[in-house]
Image (cartoon, grey):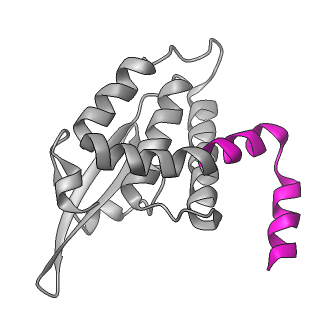
Amino acid sequence: MLMDNLIKLDKLSWKERGLLAQSLVLLPLIHIALILLGYARLRRVIEVLTPLQPEPRGRSVTESFSHACEVARIVSIAAEHGVYRATCLRKSMLLWWFLRRDGIPSRICFGVRMTHHLLEAHAWVEWDGIVLNDSIHVSDGYKALQDGLPATSMGL
C-alpha cells in the first residue's frame, strides 16, 4: 500500500506535489478555523484575504475546467490519504479557496436529505453549474439550500 502511494506520488508533477503539500497543511487548519469562526466568518476572511483574481489571459474555458478538475483531484487525495481525513465541507472550502486564488469562479453548494429519519447534510463545489468534487449527480440526492446558510450548525 505504501509503495503504491509512493509510486502515485512520483507520477505527480512538481506543481501538483506543491498543491498536495499545501492541501495536507491547510485542511486541518480549515477544520480549526471552522470551529473557531464558523462557516460564514471563515468564508468572509477568505474572500477578504484572497480576492477573486482575474483568470490568466489566454486561458480557455476548457483549460479553466481542466485546471479546476485537477485541483479538485489533488484536494481529494490530500483529504483521503493525509493524516487529517477531511469532511465534505472542509474539502469544499479548500477547493473553493484554491480556485478563487487561481481566478476560477466557483461556488460552494449545500444540500440536505433525510435518511432513516436522520437529517444528512452535504457540501460540494460547482464551476459553471458543473460539480467538481463529487458525483455529477450529487444534487439529485440532496435538496439544495441557499448560499450563506450556517453550514457548521448542520454538522458538515
Q: Quadrant of residue 106?
A: top left
Left or right: residue 80 compared with residue 50: right
* In the depicted structure, whether residue 112 falls above or below residue 97: below
Residue 31 position in % (x across, y down): 41, 51
Q: Nearer the viewer, residue 129 or 105?
A: 105
Looking at the image, residue 107 sits to the left or right of residue 102; the answer is: left
Residue at figure coordinates x 61%, y 64% from the top left: 83
What range of the chain is rendered magenta? 1-23
Examine the rendered structure and indicate whether residue 104 appears above or below residue 77.
above
Closer to the camera, 82 or 92?
Answer: 82
Residue 78: horizontal and vertical position, in percent? Answer: 62, 57
- Residue at point 45%, 21% (across, down): 50
* Most foreground residue, 58 or 19: 19
User: Does residue 17 show up magenta in the picture?
Assistant: yes
* Residue 95 highlighted magenta (yes or no): no
* Quarter of the rendering containing residue 65: top right
User: Which residue sits at x=64%, y=46%?
Assistant: 70
Q: Residue at coordinates 55% horizontally, 18% vertically from top-left? A: 55
